Amino acid sequence: MDVSFAITGKGYVILAADTTAAHSIIKVKLDEDKIKELSPHLLMAYSGEPGDTVQFAEYVERNIRLYQIRNLYPLRPSSAASWIRRSLADSLRSRKPYSVNLLLGGYDTTTHTPHLYWMDYLGTLVDVPFAAHGYGSYFALSLLDRYHDPEAPLEEGLAVLKRCIDEVTKRLVVAQPKYKVKVVDKDGVREVEL
Amino acid sequence: MPDGSFAQQPQQRQFNPYTENGGTILAIAGADFTVIAGDTRQSEGYSIQTRYAPKVFRLTDRAVLAVNGFAADGNMFVKKVKQRLEWYRHAHAKDMPLRAIARLIQTMLYAQRFFPYYVYNILGGIEEDGSGAVYSFDPVGSYEREACRAAGAAQALVQPFLDNQIYFKNQMAAAGQSHPLHLPLSDVLAIVIDSFTSATERHIEVGDGLEMYVVLAKGRSSQGLDGLRGAQEISTTNDGDRVFVIRRELKKD
Amino acid sequence: MSIMQYNGGSVIAMVGKDCVAIASDLRLGVQSLSISANYQKIFPITDRIYVGLPGLGTDVTTLHEQFRYRVNMYTIKEEREIEPQTFAQLVSSTLYERRFGPYFIEPVVAGMQKLPTGGFAPFIAATDLIGCLNFAKDFVVAGTASEKLFGVAEGLWEPDLEAEDLFETISQTLLNAVDRDAFSGWGAVVHVITKDKVVTRTLKGRMD
């Protein structure tokens, strides 16, 4: 029942994910952070099979960190996306594949451009202007088709994201009460309050 | 059983009353004519049952019906439609108008809603106002009047080609001009022949022969049709709408 | 529903007079939900070879990376560029390696083949998901709209089309075919390859 969205704008990417951790029909935690800060300019929202998600996200986090320690500079978003994709694609054809869907938002400090990648547990990697996972995608994608502007300043981007969250809260039966929202831009990653 | 007993095991048997007999049908309406065509191959699985089994039938001098799908159902359905049209003639001393035949077919198909005739119907002919018309049906009677329609085994091959050549989809008209609403008969016949030769080339269930019925509105000159190779008039009168049939060979492999 | 239809997408390649064209749609979806309207599934291999990879999204990327690696190794070892015919065989053997656990991709290759005389000849080929090659002389199709592509191409294509006419023919074929396919469409890209240049055009398409 995870819901996550992401949109790009002028020089930034916003990621949002609900904060519920559920076991079957029980909510066991209401402030779970499902967006990892992989590097100074890279965010990853993860969702999917409980257990797989955190395990895989931490595996990615540590490998991306290891790269930065070894090379003294972090991976660019496109390279990080390729590496993570390959991990999932290899996992898919292994004995026990990870069931994890990702949104990867990053700011490329060499070209000064924001990047957003949609990735599913199969290892399908797509470069997109906006994206969503879970039941929220059926609401968010059509809203974003109408309201997304790749040149919008951060305030407008956050306003559009709020429309998505409000719509899901209003219309989705299994609506999530709280969302964590993070932004990545030239200044790095940070959490914002809506 | 291994111990020699004959314990009663539940068994299930089923009779499947349907089969699929391949082939393709197609109809295109012009301003004052309609072409209704079908190939003549009838098959079951990889076997050809016959190279000449008509799928297109003259109902009246202004209506032609093409049926495709399960051949036995198709033949029975045409027989019943013809019977209803004869009763209409006896009661009203005239042929049933095309739009009325279309509605009749819907009622007859929907009457079998829970044991349907496994056929796709395409009805072509001339309306009372003299315009060419095509009506296409699904097996349970949903229908629609259109300018052109393909159905059957090669529908997926032919319909997008027709979208392009008849409706001019994805084409832009020359500056200051617009696409014609209806094409002349010679163009339509050429497109029908091309559609079937293409379908024959790429689909194993299409081929052998092609029958094209042409219905001409009353008073329209048959110019071009009489001279056409193999064109044969099959109308009962020559002072009303007229029906012609043109036969062509298709590849037999 | 089949894995081959999970993400949707179609590719077609055609032969012309001293040219070849390869084109695809730009959709990537998850069953009936469209995710992207700008998903490239045709990739340049050399200046004269393009490959289209319709099928399962994850395998599009995996195979593209695999082909890039193997073509790079070929170029280094042979100290020359790979030819279309050779590349088609490489595609075939790469897929057949996974005979009993295949990549869910039906590749389409288009390129200009260097002749012993020094000239160039148009070359197209397609394989199924386990690498069975089809060297057609006219056109090859693959993807969720393949049946429709066959029908339209068979009606529109003719031999010895000049580059501009081939572009028109392949574009019309692709657009009209994908418009009747729920899993393909959302724009298209067309590459026309001649011996000394490649012209790439992006087409607008219906967004429904």
Image (cartoon, coloured by chain):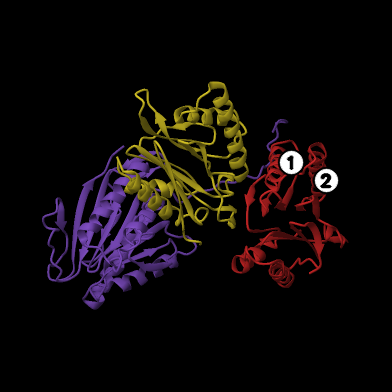
Chain colours: A red, B purple, C yellow
Q: Can residue B22 be seen in this view?
A: no
Residue B201 appears in which quarter of the rendering? top left
Picture coordinates of residue A88, whole percent (x, y): 71, 42
- Give the label, 1 or 2, closer to the camera: 2
Q: Residues within 10 Å of mark 2 (few under 14, many from 20)?
A: some
In the image, residue A88 sits, relative to residue C132, either above or below, namely below
Q: In this view, does C38 lie to the left or right of A154?
A: left
In the image, residue B19 sits, relative to residue C67, either above or below, namely below
Numbered label attached to residue C188: none
Q: In terms of secondary structure, where does tag 1 sit?
A: loop
In the image, residue A47 sits, relative to residue C114, either above or below, namely below
Picture coordinates of residue B110, whole percent (x, y): 44, 67
What separation in Å lies between label 1 and label 2 (alpha carbons)? 16 Å
Numbered label attached to residue A97: 1
Question: Considering only order in the chain, which callout, 2 or 1, is on the residue closer to the N terminus?
Answer: 2
Q: Residue at x 48, y 54 (%)?
A: C181
Q: In terms of secondary structure, where does tag 2 sit?
A: helix
Foreground of the two, A116 or A152:
A152
Identify residue for label 2: A58
Q: Is residue B96 left or right of residue C171?
A: left
